[in-house]
Image (cartoon, helix red, strand yellow):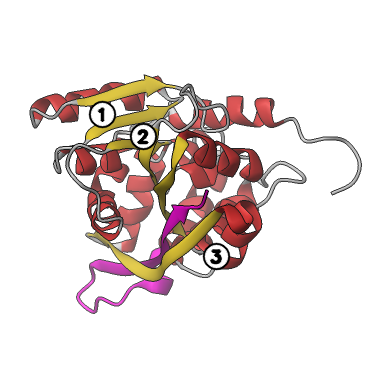
Amino acid sequence: MTGTAIDFESIKKTQRAGWETGDYPRVGNTLQIIAELLVEAADVRAGRRVLDVACGQGNAAIAAARRFTEATGVDYATNLLAQGRERAAAEHLAVTFVEGDAERLPFPDDSFDLTLSTVGVMFAPDHQRAADELVRVTAVGGKIALACWTPSGMIGRLFKTVGGWAPPPAGTRPPTLWGTPEHLSELFGERVEWVGLTNRKYVFRYHSPAHFSEWFRRFYGPITRLAGNLSDQDLDRFSEDLAEVAREYNRADDGTVAAPAEYLEAVGVLRG
């Protein structure tokens, strides 16, 4: 990149407003299985110190707490943290939820045995700084485990569609790069030995492509915020564009949506 430095703080302010719009947990709660699989892939043990970064409503923190770990979730969207606390309380799980920025984690060095993120840290605009923070708070010999949407999958396609209506800030890199081994290698270098790199698929299931479009426009904060700024005519076009993404990846033949979305499940060990 050349020219003016990227104003990451302004980008994060806008992002935060997006996540605090709508009701993201209505979407995010459906992704719980991704967190359960990630925690199992990381082979977490009872009593371990676990951090869920950009935790949203706490999918990975809750999955870890179910396995009797000392689980903590951190996010900058306070409304999502509140829902995480409600979910944990409903299951009688001891999870600590902390307000904080993935690029400036509010924890000392070497605080955790396992640092997780499920489709969360990938949205930090400064990729390198976020990766450095994951390394900093993880103890040597501990694990970093990530689940991130891939560029070539359904959500990568969705983000490109949304980007056609609201282009990302100049100079920023796509969040779906985190869903490639090459980008992880660039970000973490020799500091992390990736012992597991597995492409998995999460299946989005909705009544119809139109239902998929409506759900994301109503509840997926960044899309909700964008939709609220469109004219009636543009909103109709945008709604159809979202529905077309579901149609493109749909494998159901009964009018419903069963659309596989690829993500990379990565588990690494922090070297000394």
Q: Residue 47: x percent and y percent? A: 19, 37
Q: Residue 104: x percent and y percent? A: 56, 27
Name which residue type carries label 3. Answer: Thr
| Residue at figure coordinates x 52%, y 42% from the top left | 135
Number of residues whose C-alpha sits closer than 10 Å to that of mark 1, classed few (under 14), some (14–19) or many (20 or more): many
How far apart are the alpha carbons under marks 1 and 2?
7 Å
Q: Residue 81: x percent and y percent? A: 33, 24
Indicate whether residue 11 is drawn in magenta: no
Sooner in the amino-acid sequence: mark 1 or mark 2: 2
Name which residue type carries label 2. Answer: Gly
| Residue at figure coordinates x 53%, y 54% from the top left | 237
| Residue at figure coordinates x 36%, y 35% from the top left | 51
Residue 206's label in the rendered image is: none
Give the secondary structure at mark 3: loop
Indicate whether residue 262 is drawn in magenta: yes
Which residue corresponds to mark 3? Answer: 180
Name which residue type carries label 1. Answer: Gly
Task: Please identify the quarter of the rendering in which residue 49 is found.
Answer: top left
The answer to which of 50 and 18 lies nearer the viewer is 50
Residue ranking furthest to the right: 3
Residue range corresponding to the magenta coloring? 246-272
The answer to which of 226 and 197 lies nearer the viewer is 197
Circles 1 and 2: CB atoms closer than 8 Å:
yes
Which residue corresponds to mark 2? Answer: 56
State the count of labels. 3
Sooner in the amino-acid sequence: mark 1 or mark 3: 1
Give the secondary structure at mark 2: loop
Circles 2 and 3: CB atoms closer than 8 Å:
no
How far apart are the alpha carbons under marks 2 and 3?
22 Å
The answer to which of 151 and 27 lies nearer the viewer is 151
Which residue corresponds to mark 1? Answer: 84
In the rendered image of this protein, does residue 117 appear above or below residue 261? above
